Amino acid sequence: MADNGYISKKQFIEELRRYQKGSVTRRHFLGVTGLGAATAVLGAAMPALRPSSAFAQGIGDRVVLATWPNYHDTANFDAFTDATGAFVQVNVFGSNEEMLAKLQAGGSGWDVFVPTNYTITTYVAEDLIEPLDVSKLSNYDAGAFDPRFADAGTVDGTLYAVPKNWGTTGFAVNTSHDGGKALTTWKDFFDRTMDDFSGRTMVHDYQLTTIGNALKYFGYSFNSVDPKELADAEKLLIEAKPHLFAISSDYQPAMRSGDAWLTMCWTGDGKQMNSDIPEIHYVLGREGGEIWSDYYAIPKGAPHREAAYALINHMLDPQVNAREVLAHGYPVADSRTNALLPPEILNDPILYPAQELLDALEFGAAATLTDPNRAELLARFKSA
Amino acid sequence: MTRRERNWLLVAPAGAWFLVMLVLPLSFVFVFSFGERGPAGGYVPAFTLEQYANLPARWTAFKNTMVLAPLGTLAALLIAYPLAYQLAVRTDPRWKTLLLVLVIVPFWTSILIRSYAWIFILGGQGIPALLAALGIEDVRLIYTPFAVTVGIVYGYLPLMVFPIYVALDRLDKRLLEASSDLGARPFATFWQVTLPLSVPGVATGCMLVFILLMGEFLIPALLGGGKVFFVGNALVDLFLQSRNWAFGSAVAFTLILIMLVTVAIYMRLIARLQVRRDDVAIM
Amino acid sequence: MSKTFGDVEAARDLDLRISPGEFLSFLGPSGCGKTTALRMLAGFEAPTRGDVLIDGQVVNQLEPHRRPVNMVFQSYALFPHLSVADNIGYGLRQRRPRLARSVIADKVERALETVRLSGFGKRRVWEMSGGQQQRVALARAIVNEPKLLLLDEPLAALDRKLRKEMQIELQDLQRQLGITFVLVTHDQEEALSLSDRICVMRAGRIVQVGSPQELYDCPASRYVADFVGNSNFFEGRIEEVDGALARLVTGGGQTLAGRASPGLAAGRDGCLSIRPEQIRIGSEPGPGCIEVTVQNRIFLGEHTEYLVRHGGLGNIIVLAPRQAEIGARGFEAGARAFLNWSDEAALILNPD
Ligand SMILES: Nc1ncnc2c1ncn2[C@@H]1O[C@H](COP(=O)(O)OP(=O)(O)OP(=O)(O)O)[C@@H](O)[C@H]1O
Ligand SMILES: [Mg+2]
């Protein structure tokens, strides 16, 4: 509150954002419930009321974006609409599998989508993704991107996707309940779940991370599809299940309310919870785990292809991108954007963990995503 | 137009609806269930019984559904019956409409939002916090089978209340007087007249709730914390996560078969209990 | 006692004593409160004012299932989910201590015989005709041998022949069982032939109670005279009341004599009632005869009904027994005829 007694616009926006963070996580409840296809329309203004510059540029009146919840600064969409006349219709999704399922089924109507690194080769193999024409992306400067988070966008020498954000998968722990003994490893995560965190732990409703992190308990690869190693992970998960509070990727509300004390967690959620409740720490298991990066891409048959290029180009503008980071708390791989970010962000150990922790992390593999055995394992775990 | 042609014309919309919305999708499901999953998911044509051989992998999901669906139906019945009875028999006709509307009002909000409300009510800061204030510590409600049952009963209550209400409302009140006149105490009248005559309503309500519960996935996902796994949840995962359309189709088709068989057995039982042929299910 | 529904006064100041073993009928037009009166006796309605007594006990607060009273409902109210036999045995099954199954079965069998439905026990009630259903309803009530049996138009759905048979059956039953019967009907013939006493009602009130003959011969008002049997009415001014006899001058200047009903006063408006069967019709003039023109003749089997017209009195209905016409061919429309009746047969009433 300002001294004069009313709330400033900036404060208001901050409050609003905090509220949004509390109610929506990256793997939003829509994902959990299978209603991922539910459509939220942002930039609510009627297209007809928009300036007609869109016609001048010939990109049409709209662009449909399939992305993750709470992963954008809506002001950036408004600016895009003001500049081009095309309004941004946003569909939010719960998982990469779900995005893939929707594209496989056909008729998605999307213009831009946000796949994670390990899915792109599958999209290419299934012929669901459009090669990008770099000449239409003037803000894309390949040299500015850390190759670790940009490489997956290129398959067999063709550019299919440009980097959006990257992040890690660790766990969040409410340290007021750890009895002074900090949790630092995935072994701690599962052992303490079956001990002093019993009934208070959440794991993702997502085979990639839940199985991957259980594999790390034994020191196996996050991406393992080895039957024996998977059997060990399954045994651990089923043993831990009676001690779980929930199997859900919508963990922020329960962590914030105090019902849950420990959860698998993605960077941005960890940052958001930690900002509001400092006792909640974000930890990367010392054994390793997942590092990932998301990309912008255009699906085959996008109905508003020009608008899709225009939107991606707009989002790649370092000014725009910097505003995105401030809104959602996920790091970017673009050095031009980082140059615009304040030092608190760049030095934040949640966004930019220590190098030795980062070194232990693995990128998810395409085979991990599509492996039928892992999917079956998760089903057995959930129904056990 | 002959009478016959007119009759055909009258059933044409329903027939078309059935064809497009029921027969066609079911045929797809049936055909897919003999196929295989592609390397990246989806469906690859084949003729194999492998998917059906795999069904035991979802045995727990079937078991949970077959246990919780009847239990949820029963719980909904036990709560809905007294409510419907009160509305139909005891309430001044002037208030009936208003109270009936109140029963459906929750239906005007998405089940998603209502289930979220239950997450807060049953969550640590809801009822357990109240109980803790009364000295009863450590009560866990949310993400338990109990929470799922509460959600189910809450969500499906109107579907149960309405048919029972209709049956009780149609019941000739003079029959109750006749029973009383013949020396039956109020409870005996209820047991020997009211209850048997409301059987069609009870049957319809149970059927509606039971069938919908067999396919339920939202409430277990939201209020069961992912730990209470119904066939519906297995299907969501198979189609939206692992994209195993072939196996998903086999599971779906099996579920449909189980539903049909259960419903048929149930119809038999009810028909035996059924009192008036012209009353048979208002469905 | 009285009963009001909102602002409808369905029954008003009903004061009636029914003796044990009596056969009493409520007679009145539709909506006059007959059913309401019965329902108060059965206990379905509490009197708004006044008391219901059974055997000297005030039973206002006693619920229907505790009253030694059974009712045969106007709409039968049979249980659709039970067989005929189970419907009839329903009351017996409510008894505590319980009756043995065989006892119940016996009583049900006998009740079925009484209403001539032996062999129908296993039927469903909706498989029965309206008349059969009515008899099931009757059996369901009498099988309990109540102190008081209330019958709300129990024979209305029967054909004439069956109705006659059932009326006799009812009467026999009542004598046999010694049960007090209260019958509601708007069939005056039924009331007249069955009842020990009839209670005539009008708009919620009792207008006269008496034996069938009292009501027929000495109706207390024009309403009763009109409702119980048929009558010709001539209106006029009462000229003179002389003990049991009175004289009345009609608007047309005719002076007529008749028995005086109680409470007549000279100089007031009055009304003379003469039953059609009390009028003799003939072709020859005689002392005291009035001359009329025959308008219409209706052949009724054992009687012939004539509608005749008199210059001063207007239309008159005459019922002539057939034996009076044997040989003669009766009167054709347009024929001249002469009427006469004895003064004792006519009754002079207040015109209410
Ligand atoms: N529950 C009720 N609420 C309001 N008015 C009623 C109720 N029951 C009866 N009445 C009214 O009371 C009056 C008497 O009704 P009742 O049923 O006693 O008539 P009835 O003499 O039995 O007629 P009928 O020969 O047609 O059966 C009628 O005017 C009726 O409309
Ligand atoms: Mg009546």
Image: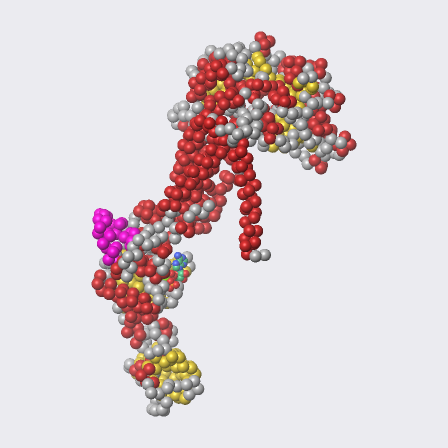
Residue closest to the far top: A356
Residue C41 higher or lower than C201, as above or below: above
Does residue B180 sit above or below A283 in this rendering? Answer: below
Q: Residue C332: percent from the left, percent from the top?
A: 41, 85
Q: Measured from the top left, where is residue A176 in percent x and y?
A: 48, 16
Magenta run includes residue C104: yes
**Looking at the rendering, in which quadrant would you find the N terminus of chain B?**
bottom right
Q: Is residue A272 above or below residue A48?
A: above
* Position of B281 relative to A75 (above/below): below
Q: Indicate which quadrant contains ligand 2.
A: bottom left
Along the viewing direction, whichever of B70 and B90 lies nearer the viewer: B70
Q: Quadrant of residue C197?
A: bottom left
Query: How many marks are shown on the rendered structure?
Result: 0
Q: Is residue C330 left or right of residue A325?
A: left
Give the magenta part as a residue range: C85-111
Overall secondary structure of the magenta section = helix
The residue sitting at 33% across, 78% down in the picture is C302
Q: Can residue A38 be seen from the camera position used here?
A: yes
Q: Is residue B75 magenta?
A: no
x, y percent for residue C83 = 32, 52
A355 relative position to C75: left or right: right
Q: Residue at x 64, y 22 (%)?
A: A124
Q: Is residue A304 left or right of residue A246?
A: right
In screen coordinates, is C207 left or right of A267? left
Quadrant in the rendering for residue A146:
top right
Q: Which residue is at 49% across, 14% downward? A: A229
Q: Is residue A4 visible?
A: no
Q: Closest to the observer: A126 or A301?
A: A126
